[in-house]
Image (cartoon, rainbow, N blue to C red):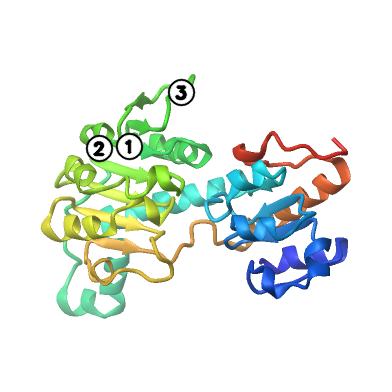
Amino acid sequence: MHKHAVERLNALFPTLNVKAADASLLSEDERGSVRGIASMTRIDAAFIDALPNLEIIASFGVGYDHVDAKHAGSKGVMVTNTPDVLTEEVADTAIGLLINAVRELPKAEAWLRAGKWASAGNYPLTRGTLRARSVGIFGMGRIGLAIARRVEAFGLPVSYHNRRKVDGLGYAYHDTLVGLAKSVDTLISVAPGGASTEKAVNAEVLAALGPTGVFVNIGRGTTVDEAALAKALSDGTIMAAGLDVFEKEPNVPDDLMQAPNASLLPHVGSASLHTRQAMADLVVDNLVSWFDEGKPLTAVPETVHVKNGKA
C-alpha cells in the first residue's frame, strides 16, 4: 500500500498490517475486529468470508478485477476504487505510447545515446506517422473519453466499442470489436479485466486492424492474446504496438521483449508522485466517509446497493 495512505490510516484507525490477504495470518480475534480493508492486492471470496464484521474494501486503483466485488456485494460488503484522480495521467501515457510506437522515439533516443547520430548519420525515417490515422477506443469509460479528447486534438477521427453505446456521445459506435478494428488503423485498449474481456484482442481483431495498424494497451494485460500479438508484430500483420500492461506482470513474454516494433513500459500509466498520492488519499477518504458519513465516495457498480447503518 502507498506510504501516504498507510500514514493516514495509522493516524485515523487502529490498523493491522498483513503481507497478504490470507486469513491464516490473522488470529481469530483479529479477524473479528476487521471492519475495513485498504488494499492493492487480490481479495478473494474466502478472505471476505473469513472476516465476519467486514464492511468495506477500499481498493487502490481504478481497475478492481483483483477484488471479488460480486461476492462482496452479495455479503453486504462495500467495495470502492480510485477513479477520476488517475484519468488524465493514464490518458497522457496512452498518447505517449501511441507516439512512441508510431514514431519510434525510444529507438531514436537510443540511436543518439549510442553515438550513431555522429557515426552513422540521421536516424532512419519512420514508416509510421499520426497523420491521416483513424483511432478506435476499446472501452469508452472515463479514461477512454480522456484519450478521445487528446486524439481529437491531433485532428484524428475517433470510433469506439463498448458493451453498449454511450448515450449522447458523438463518436461512431461499433457493436463488435472486430468491426471497430476493421474501420480504423489504430486501436487503443482501455478495457477492464475479467472473464468478459479475456483475450478479446485476438488474432482476428489484429488481422482486421491491418498491416499499417498500431495497437496500444493501457487497460489490462488479460484483455490481449499476447501470443497472437507477438505473432502479428513479427509477421507484419500489424505495424507496431505500445504496451503498458501485461497478462502476468511483472513477467513479459520473451517474444514481446524481443519485438523491435513494440514500445514497452512497466505498468506506469498512473505512476507519478502527484497522481499516486491522490489515489492514496481517495482510498483513505472512502474509508473515512464510510465510517463517518455512512456512505462511500466511489462505490463500484457491483456494490452500489450496499448500505451502511448510518446512511
How many residues crowd mark 2 within 10 Å: few (<14), some (14–19), many (20+)? many
Quick check: marks 1 and 2 in contact, CB under 8 Å? yes
**What is the C-alpha distance between the residues marked 2 and 3?**
19 Å
Tell me where residue 267 appears, x and y as whole percent.
Answer: 46, 62
| Residue drawn at the location 46% of the way across and 23% of the way down | 169
Q: Secondary structure at mark 2?
A: helix
Residue holding disc 1 = 136
Task: Say what amino acid the circle numbered 1 marks.
Answer: Gly
How many residues crowd mark 3 within 10 Å: few (<14), some (14–19), many (20+)? few
Quick check: marks 1 and 3 in contact, CB under 8 Å? no
| Residue drawn at the location 67% of the way across and 56% of the way down | 48
Q: Secondary structure at mark 1?
A: strand
Residue holding disc 3 = 169
Q: Secondary structure at mark 3?
A: loop
Tell me where residue 6 appears, x and y as whole percent.
Answer: 75, 67
Residue holding disc 2 = 181
Q: Is residue 8 visible?
A: no
Q: Is residue 256 visible?
A: yes
Of label 1 and label 2, which has the lower sequence position? 1
Q: Nearer the viewer, residue 276 or 200?
A: 200
Looking at the image, residue 50 sits to the left or right of residue 105; the answer is right
